Amino acid sequence: MKTKAGAILSSIRIDRSVDQKISVQLYMGLRDVILGGGLSGRLPASRTLATEVGVSRTTVIEAVGRLVSEGLVESRVGAGTYVSSTIGQRVDIARKKTEPKKGKRPKLAHSAKRAARQFVHRDQLPRKSQSFITALPALDSFPMAQWARLSARHWRGDRDAVMGYGYPQGLPRLRAAIATHLNATRGINCEPEQLFIVAGAQHAFSLIAGTLLNRGEKVWFENPGAIGARNALVARGANLAAVQVDADGLDVEDGLRKAPNFRLAFVTPSHQQPLGRIMSLKRRLALLQAAEGADALIVEDDYDGDFYYGNQPLPTLKSIDTANRVIYVGTFSKTLFPSLRLGFFVAPPNLVDTFSRIFASELSGTPTWPQAVVADFMDEGHFATHVRAMRALYRQRHDVLHEEASRLAGLLNIEKASAGFHTIGRLEDGLSEKRVVAAAAQAGLILSPISRYCLSPIAEKGLVIGYGSTDASQIRQGMTVLRRVLRG
Ligand SMILES: Cc1ncc(COP(=O)(O)O)c(C=O)c1O
């Protein structure tokens, strides 16, 4: 040994509060010491190791056993356990791995360079329920037990079905279940063949743009509009026209003025992202007509359309699309949970062949077993029950937010919403978005300014406020903190 065992072993930290076996922690600690060159020659006896680190001898034997099986140490009969004689080379390799490599960055494709200049930086994607965070559904109310039961069933069933390569276009059973759901709840008549399962709506946007757009072609984009979709489109070379959004949703006249020869329009008609407006029927019809006139297609992003709690939902664009202009995109990130990374799109019949060929020849599909679990969840009726319950819950959470909103009067005017689980708060004159967002962050609140969603500046100033992921008491607490921030 290069140094005394005690000094080396004291660098190994065992944390009993973390959810990781002690023997694994010890194995990792010893491995790091050995690869770092801190230990060579004979290992201390297992009894010494156990005393020094404060663990049982069995734990030591388990950890050392793993080091032996990985060839980092070797047992010599009657002579103890030694750090492997070839470890010197490994230490060199490990050191090289951790040293940052210098040198010139490889040349990037022009498209990647161009896109990087236009990307809007996305903050960390929301992972944890938190006051006012957007995009995260009510994870606290997800039926975990049911989900776990259905998942377990697949691991007890036919191995080929869960472990072999799946279906590039998506599990047929899931596509059939989605087609039934869309028909029943969104008025969309489509065949399962028109459905393509993807790794979230974001994946659909990239695929659609990559298939339909040539570089520099005009795309109508809501201003303000969805950041992820915007980045996906610019990455595929889209030339975005910032089309204004008013009380009726995307302003079709403005689009025709700015880019009459548009190739694609990206819209969120059921609940505009981020302003929360619902596109009027008149505008929906005008948009369909404009697309037909320009021989363009429309991407309808219905990300949270299942959660409508107003009087009567308007028909989806897809359900009134008589000229095959609409590609409807849906996601399970809001109806179930975002880490699932499952979404889908409905291609018009005249594009099914094109997408089928792309999926069959270029893509290998999304993981099979989560699709199978979702299909069961839908077929057994849990999906419809969950969506119904969440619709009621989001309405309740919305109402709590609104009861509290009067406390912010004169500072922030929070709009009523009738869908989804975010709305906007309009800042009164004299309050700067940037300063409020920074002060809120200091107080532990994550708020997004409307300006982040803008392609070109707009007059409205305000904050996007999520209310889906936290319960009533957390919403009230958040509002108390927000009031303090705004007053400050
Ligand atoms: C407008 C919009 N569309 C779609 C999505 C869902 O994207 P994904 O399905 O990739 O999680 C989001 C997520 O927040 C969104 O804001």
Image: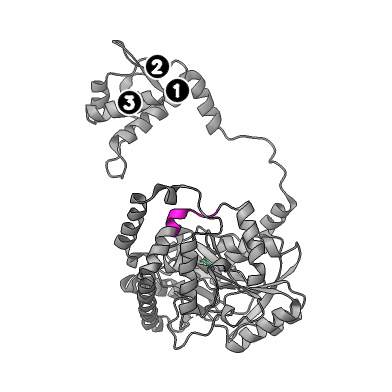
Q: Earlier in the sequence, mark 3 or mark 1?
A: 1
Task: Where is residue 393? Give x, y as percent.
Answer: 35, 76
Q: Are marks 3 and 1 in contact (CB under 8 Å)?
A: no
Which residues fall within the magenta stretch? 365-371
Magenta segment: does it hold 108? no
Residue 458 visible somewhere in the drawing: yes
The residue carrying pointer 1 sits among few (fewer than 14), some (14 to 19) or many (20 or more) residues within 10 Å by Cα, namely some
Mark 2 and mark 1 residues within 8 Å of each other at the beta carbon: yes
What kind of residue is marked 1? Answer: Gly
Looking at the image, is mark 3 or mark 2 earlier in the sequence?
2
Evaluate if marks 3 and 2 touch, with contact meaning CB atoms under 8 Å apart: no
Where residue 334 sits, quadrant-wise, is bottom left
Say if 310 sits above or below 32 in the image. below
Query: Looking at this view, is 238 or 286 the one in front?
Result: 286
Provide the secondary structure element on which disc 3 rests.
helix
Q: Secondary structure at mark 1?
A: loop
Q: What residue is rendered at 47% in x and 73% in y?
A: 180
Q: Name the residue beneath numbered marker 2.
A: 2
Q: Which mark is residue 37?
A: 1
Q: Residue furthest top?
A: 78
Tell me which residue sits at (53%, 68%) in the image. 192
Q: Camera-side residue: 160 or 396?
A: 160
Q: Amino acid at mark 2?
A: Lys
State which tag comes first along the sequence, 2 or 1.
2
Q: Which residue is mark 3?
A: 65
Within 10 Å of disc 3 (Cα), the crowding (few <14, some 14-19, many 20+) is some
From the viewer's perspective, tell me whether residue 203 is left or right of residue 389.
right
